[in-house]
Image (spheres, helix red, strand yellow):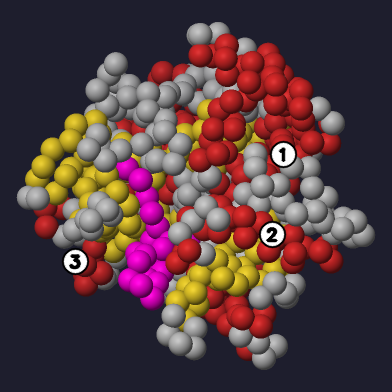
């Protein structure tokens, strides 16, 4: 078997260095990425999406290269060389055109979160010293407002302007620019095509979603991103013939690097999702084979599969088929896609792989989907690491772990305790240049020998396998000095039937003790308005229990589930109190819980009703 990691000691630290599961396919910079893909894949389909008439439309790799050159040449002619160019909009082909036109020889691209309100976008435009904004028509109203605040900013609409703007001279449309750029190229203008690519200067400025009022601005270079894409080819086995459904926001590095740059470099078709409600439909109609997603979506998919099995009335037969399939796999016969064909007809007949990141995933879901025939790989990384740092792969996929570092990246644990747990450190060409205009934060996060402090706690085995425990900032220190992490409880709570999601925190009691408390968000699908709820099963997979609780009985139902859960953990870590709600948790655009904001919401909710957690226990609020 190929050696995929090497482990060594350095200055008292165990260091795990990734070697890659597969031979690397290097790319030097992002312009080379576009041109190399055009040369390798030509007129093969690079993008799939629906036009205004809902007709499926395609763009080839050759189209991408040509369109980027047209737009980039026009950007140069507009005098945008060296400028900060923001991009905001839904995931779409034109988003990528603007991104590449900006970053590959023009200036610095600043991807903006499409979900932010006007005031926050205005703040980021100011902080990022943005001079031009590329936007989709859906944001035309916001741009009109920004134009009032920033008199010197120019605006480029990704389509024909939906209506005449207040100050038309400050607006132009991407189709017109591309037409102009094509004419310039035909006349021999090579200003953009021949522009130098500086590998180690600021190329992409990304604002972290964060959980604080002031997000950090991460500076990434072309080298950071190109090296990360190169390393990705050593851990993800995918290529021409695969179709990826782009559903996570492109401004986030997980989708931007893995779901966009990596896919283009690998000759994979990118299909654009129409929205979270259309995921299942889009997977089937586009023939999707690969998903890059987050645990919340995979968890919802798994629960739907289990619910459909329950409703079919064939749960017992299905369980026997799983046992038979497992036995056959043990002797080298894989018939999963045959035995569970009906499951995949609903899930997506061609779906074979999901790459999951951004938050912990229940290991039982990884195991459960694998038994059906869908491989789940988990990745670990941060915006500051471009983002890929470590991941599981075909050669090493242990549920509950994050695998090993990707090729050419080092991972270590700083000052591990008696259990080997400490802060995860990362070193490699993927580590950011620093935080924009924040030397103090940069110095705190990038320490000696180029190690980056992630703020995450984890362990590293003797074989170099990484496990993550939780965030340093969210760690709960109990009265006895023991440590607990919300993420580990939330994974267990989310497995209780009819729990959509959960939030766990350490509540300070009057006597100074720290009590583990939880907020439970109900999954209303399947909750009956009249039928009483039985207690959760004491054994077996709770997702197969087939319970139909009533909303009026949910407190007892959840209480029984938590008591069952508490039996499997040390008494000092038992969940003491909980509240129940139907409202969504406050999350980032990649569905991470905004913990400080959620905690403040709970404080206000309890204070408003004159309650403290002991008296609020079990209430539907």
Q: Check the image and name the residue furthest to the left.
A: 11
- Residue at x 42%, y 24% (from the top left corner): 394
Q: List the residue tagged with mark 3.
A: 443
Instruction: Name the N-terminal-most of marks 3 and 2.
Output: 3
In the rendered structure, find residue 544 and report the number of the disc placed on it.
Answer: 1
Could you say where residue 374 lies in the image, as x and y percent from the top left? 58, 27
Q: CA distance from mark 3 to mark 1?
A: 50 Å
Q: Residue at x 57, y 14 (%)?
A: 327
How packed is label 3: few (under 14 Cα within 10 Å), some, or many (20 or more)?
Answer: few
Q: Is residue 615 left or right of residue 361?
A: right
470 is within the stretch colored magenta: yes
- Left or right of 99? Residue 472 is left
Give the residues in magenta.
466-486
Residue 310 image point, x, y percent: 79, 36
Number of the front mark, 3 or 2: 2
Write the residue at 55% across / 66% down. Answer: 575
Decide: is 495 above or below 266: below
The label number, if any, that marks residue 519 in the structure image = none
Secondary structure under the numbered disc 3 in the rendered image = helix
> x, y percentage for residue 439?
21, 69
Front residue of 369/21: it is 369
Residue at 48 percent across and 49 percent down: it is 360
Compare residues 220 and 103 and report the one nearer the observer: 220
* Residue at the spot of label 2: 560
Instruction: Say if 511 sits above or below 102 in the image.
Output: below
Q: Secondary structure at mark 2?
A: helix
Figure check: 344 above or below 183 = above
360 or 187, nearer to the observer: 360
């Amino acid at each position: 078997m190929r050696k995929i990691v090497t482990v060594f000691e350095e200055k008292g630290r165990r260091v795990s260095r990734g070697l890659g599961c597969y031979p690397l396919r290097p790319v030097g910079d992002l312009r080379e990425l576009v041109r190399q893909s055009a040369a390798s894949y030509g007129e093969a389909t690079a993008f799939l999406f629906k036009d205004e008439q809902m007709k499926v439309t395609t763009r080839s790799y050759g189209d991408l290269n040509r369109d980027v050159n047209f737009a980039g040449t026009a950007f140069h002619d507009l005098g945008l060389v060296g400028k900060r160019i923001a991009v905001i909009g839904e995931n779409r082909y034109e988003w990528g055109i603007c991104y590449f036109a900006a970053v590959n020889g023009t200036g610095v691209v600043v991807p903006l979160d499409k979900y932010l309100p006007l005031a926050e976008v205005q703040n980021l435009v100011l902080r990022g010293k943005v001079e031009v904004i590329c936007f989709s028509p859906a944001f035309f109203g916001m741009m009109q407002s920004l134009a009032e605040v920033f008199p010197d900013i120019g605006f480029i609409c990704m389509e024909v302007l939906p209506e005449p703007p207040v100050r038309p001279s400050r607006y132009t449309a991407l189709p017109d620019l591309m037409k102009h750029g094509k004419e310039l190229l035909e006349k021999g203008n090579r200003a953009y095509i021949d522009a130098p690519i500086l590998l180690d200067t600021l190329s992409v400025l990304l604002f972290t979603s964060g959980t604080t009022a002031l997000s950090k601005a991460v500076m990434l270079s072309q080298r950071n991103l190109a090296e990360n894409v190169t390393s990705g080819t050593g851990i993800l086995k995918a290529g021409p013939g695969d179709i990826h459904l782009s559903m996570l926001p492109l401004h986030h590095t997980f989708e931007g690097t893995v779901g966009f740059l990596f896919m283009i470099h690998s000759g994979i078709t990118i299909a654009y999702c129409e929205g979270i409600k259309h995921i299942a439909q889009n997977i089937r109609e586009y023939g999707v084979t690969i998903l890059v997603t987050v645990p919340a979506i995979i968890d919802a998919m798994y629960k739907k599969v289990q619910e459909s099995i329950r409703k079919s009335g064939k749960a017992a037969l299905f369980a026997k088929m799983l046992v038979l399939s497992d036995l056959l796999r043990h002797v080298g016969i894989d018939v999963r896609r045959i035995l569970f064909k009906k499951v995949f007809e609903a899930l997506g007949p061609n779906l074979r792989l999901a790459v999951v990141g951004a938050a912990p995933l229940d290991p039982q879901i990884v195991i459960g989907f694998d038994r059906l025939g869908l491989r789940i790989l988990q990745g670990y990384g941060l915006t500051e690491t471009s983002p890929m740092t470590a991941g599981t792969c075909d050669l090493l996929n242990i549920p509950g772990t994050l695998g090993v570092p990707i090729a050419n990246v080092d991972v270590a644990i700083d000052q591990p305790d008696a259990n080997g747990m400490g802060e995860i450190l990362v070193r490699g060409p993927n580590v950011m240049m620093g935080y924009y205009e924040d030397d103090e934060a940069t110095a705190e996060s990038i320490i000696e020998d180029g190690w980056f402090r992630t703020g995450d706690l984890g362990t590293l085995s003797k074989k170099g396998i990484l496990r993550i425990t939780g965030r340093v900032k969210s760690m709960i220190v109990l009265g006895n000095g023991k440590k607990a992490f919300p993420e580990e409880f939330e994974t267990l709570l989310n497995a209780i039937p009819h729990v959509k999601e959960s939030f766990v925190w350490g509540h300070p009691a009057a006597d100074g003790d720290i009590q583990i408390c939880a907020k439970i968000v109900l999954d209303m699908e399947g909750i009956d308005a009249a039928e009483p709820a039985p207690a959760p099963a004491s054994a077996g997979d709770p997702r197969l229990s087939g319970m139909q609780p009533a909303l009026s009985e949910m407190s007892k139902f959840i209480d029984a589930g938590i008591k069952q859960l508490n039996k499997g953990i040390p008494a000092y870590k038992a969940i003491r109190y909980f509240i129940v709600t139907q409202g969504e948790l406050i999350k980032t655009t990649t569905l991470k819980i905004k913990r400080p904001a959620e905690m403040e919401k709970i404080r206000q909710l309890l204070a408003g009703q004159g309650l403290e957690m002991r008296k609020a226990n079990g209430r539907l609020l």
